[in-house]
Image (cartoon, rainbow, N blue to C red):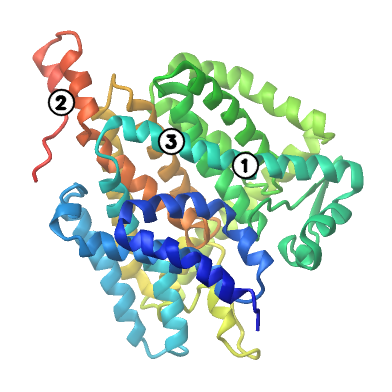
Amino acid sequence: MNFLLLPVALLAAPLVLMCMLRWRWGFLGLLVYLPFAGVVSLSLSGEIPKLFKDLFFAIPCIAMFFLAGRDSLARAPLPSWLTMLLAFYAFVAFAQVGNPQLYDWRVAMIGIKVSLLYLPLVYVAAAFCERGEEVATLMRRLLIVGLVPCGFGIATFMLSLAMGYENTMRAIYGAAAEAVTQDFTRFDFGATLGRFNSTFTFAAQYGQFCLAMIVPAYAVAFADPTARWRLLGKIGLGVVLIAGLLSGSRSLFVFMPLLLLLTLIVDARLTKMFAGLLLGPVFVLTVLEIAGFDVMALFTGVSHLATVYSKNVAVAGLLDTIASTPLGTGTGMATIASRHVLPEDYVFVAVENYYAKVVVELGVMGLLALLAIFAGLVVLGLNARRQTAGTPLQPAASALLGYLVTMMLTSGKGWALDLDPANVYFWVFAGLMIKLPYLTTQVATAAQAPQQHPFLASLKRPPQLLR
């Protein structure tokens, strides 16, 4: 038994009380704690510390938000059709608890927790900001907090060049070094590209965190009202990109540039997009050259990996599961965390495709519900971008939509939406994106805009939020 759990629980009691008194405090607490949850779980042995973010922040925050009733829900302008899609997806997940192929109720509980616990955050996030200024403040906070893990990850990589990868990881993480690095997995691309996890428990989590931090960095860099913050945003964007490229998550060599490109296209910043296409590769090559990598070897390795995943995992893996388990096998049966409650002789087959994993658990019906939700979010994102055109909220809307689309694409090769911190950021960013057209700052900005043709003006007119 870990005797540190008792004092930690006593210290955390005021946090839980604060979250219960004010759901907004719980929401902010969750976003601040999330990047450092891995430090706590690595410092305290056992499974309970892994649940601290849920027990101390997420669950109290969500519970108090919905217990507040109509007052809080009125601030979350999700369309009724999206609520119906989310409810149907949850219904399918609960219905699959009765699947005869389900191993036992513990697997079902894990599946429900992983699939549905953070989904209500879309309502919480949509209700959090009531003015455009609050969006700017929230993006600043996310960026400042996010620079800490990114900076630590870069420092760890630099230290590994001097001390060696294995020695560095053992010096920092001690007995947990072997587990967090997947037995010190590394790739030889001229220099050693190891798996770095910074303040997280796995490199994949750290990589997904770097991907998510592009959103606040971009929003601050191109939309913050203060010049000093815009400068910090541009510096932060560079730091986040470097951290992601050096994290050891090879997929980020594809998805980080993709996210930036999508964001610039949606944001209609053609000049910056062309500049990015010209200077972006130079920036990446410079970082890799300084780190000592063989660029051609790295490019060849990543290209081969992308080809294999797109053919054998993203397409073939999904088609195979549709053919073999069209009705599903039960909620949680393909969730990685379920291994902790399955017997040692049980053969657990991991599915490296989030959509295929949904089919294995929830069947084709669950997949269709999920795809409908994703399609709905894209439609709402395009609407948010259109409604915020020409306002300070436009870059945020573009970055949020770019992130959601990128995550939908990455789900074809992995299960990031099942893991911290992407499982939180995805729904939080979706809620923020949906709320942007309704914020009062945009209405004021639109009222001060130059007169133009009535038809063009109608395309930018924000909808009225009914209360």
Judging from the image, what secondary structure is the residue with disc 2 in? loop
> Label 2: few (<14), some or many (≥20) within 10 Å?
some
Residue on which disc 2 sits: 461
Can residue 465 be seen in this snapshot? yes
> Label 1: few (<14), some or many (≥20) within 10 Å?
some
Return the residue nearer the eye: 238 or 307: 238
Give the amino acid at mark 2: Arg
> Is mark 2 in CB contact (under 8 Å) with mark 1?
no
Residue on which disc 3 sits: 139
Counting residues from the start of the chain, the first of labels 2 and 1 encountered is 1
In the picture, measured across the screen, residue 84 lies left or right of residue 98, that is left
In the picture, measured across the screen, residue 183 lies left or right of residue 438, that is right
Counting residues from the start of the chain, the first of labels 2 and 3 encountered is 3
Residue 361 lies, with reference to residue 150, above or below; the image says below
Return the residue nearer the eye: 67 or 340: 67
Can residue 356 be seen in this snapshot? no
Judging from the image, what secondary structure is the residue with disc 1 in? helix
In the picture, measured across the screen, residue 42 lies left or right of residue 333, that is right
Q: Quadrant of the N terminus?
A: bottom right
In the picture, measured across the screen, residue 105 lies left or right of residue 353, that is left
Give the amino acid at mark 3: Met
Q: Position of residue 341 (x, y in %)?
A: 55, 85
Q: Position of residue 184 (x, y in %)?
A: 81, 60
Residue on which disc 1 sits: 148
